[in-house]
Amino acid sequence: MLFSESAAPQPVSAPKDAGQPKVLFGAPRAPTPKGDRPRVLAAGEVRHRISCSVADLQNIDADATQAVAKAALRIIDSTNLDDHYFDDVVRFGASLQAEHGRLAEGELDIVSSEAVAAGRGLAGELLQRLTALDPDKVFAVRGGFLNAVKALAAPRDPAGLFSRLYPEVRALATELDALAPDIVAVATQVRAIGKAYKGLANSLAAHILAGRFLVHHIGGLQLPDRARQTHYASQSQALETRTSSLSATKATVEMSIWTVAAASQEIEALARAAEGLLQEDLPAWHSAYSAALTAARSAQSQERAGVSAPLRNLHTRILGKLKLERNRS
């Protein structure tokens, strides 16, 4: 069926409020903006963040560093005192004590390391033989009371003594050199444990500071709800117990830091001696000692010159390395 042009429908104009939503009941209102902080409810009541600052924490402990105070502030912000099960309080710092147990086991493994124990033994035997080859005694010079005493104690056959003891020195140095990679590995482990102990001590200090603040904070609360006041007081007592336990752990950790540092110095020195003795120190010492034996065959040169300075210096340096291990063992 055809329609004339005049029968075409008239265009309908769009309403003015076509782009706006229609409100069927009441007046339109803008939506409430969302807050930029989380809202935590405790028994239907909004839980507010505990008011605390780095300055407040440093007032409690003037020796606390900025880093420790900031870490304590994060711990306080994350502790929920409204939990009916005391979960945050009961486990307050417990993970740090578990970490201390793990580090203590690693420290024990290092102390009982077979490679380090064998290295100490070899260093001790080397020290005994090199002490017997002390050039000041072996090549004692006559003249003067002190030199005369040394000459009386000197061996009659320096070359024979050297020929007998040097192969033993060489064999011991070879065994120590073979242990060098294992000793170096232990030295690396002990450095890592020392670093971990220092980090653990800082974390313990932060938890102890946070615990002290929370106990002080709870002590100053006056709540109208008696049940809630009792709930907070119970957590305060639990926090005091946990803080005391963490303080005892921190004292043990600080002692371990000192022990591990001493062990680290010893093991690193042993590693240096093990790595350099056979390839560097011993060949130079052997050459200087052989030269001294050659010179000592002449009675005149023995009475006139005595021990050469290079040999004395080399011998003193090697003994110094080996005595370091013995004195710290």
Image: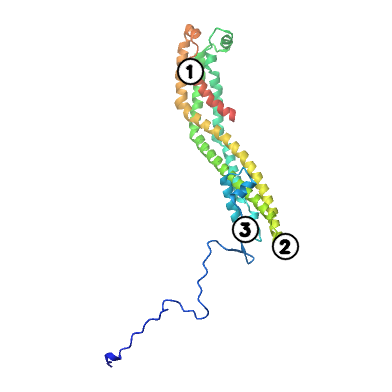
For label 3, the SS is loop
Amino acid type indicated by mark 3: Asn
Q: Is residue 90 above or below residue 33?
A: above
Q: Position of residue 192 (x, y in %)?
A: 53, 41
Of residue 51 and residue 289, the one placed in the foreground of this image is 51
Q: What percent of the width, then of the height, locates residue 295?
A: 46, 11
Amino acid marked by disc 1: Leu
**For the C terminus, which image quadrant?**
top right
Distance from disc 2 to disc 3, alpha carbons, whole Å, reads: 19 Å
Rate crowding at label 2 as few (under 14), some (14 to 19) or many (20 or more) other CA atoms within 10 Å: few
Foreground of the two, 167 or 76: 76
Q: Which residue is under mark 1?
A: 311
Q: Nearer the viewer, residue 8 or 328?
A: 8
Quick one: label 2 or label 1, which is nearer the N terminus?
2
Q: How many marks?
A: 3
- Local packing at callout 1 (Cα closer than 10 Å; few below 14, some 14-19, many 20+) is many
Viewer-nearest residue: 184 or 257: 257
Task: Return the disc, 1 or 3, that comes first in the chain's sequence.
Answer: 3
Q: Secondary structure at mark 1?
A: helix
- Closest to the camera, between mark 2 and mark 1, is 2
Which residue is tagged 2? 226
Q: Amino acid at mark 2?
A: Arg
Q: Secondary structure at mark 2?
A: helix
Look at the image and tell me whether residue 292 can be seen.
Answer: yes
- In this rendering, position of residue 53 left or right of residue 171: right
Give me the residue at 56% from left, 29% from top: 325
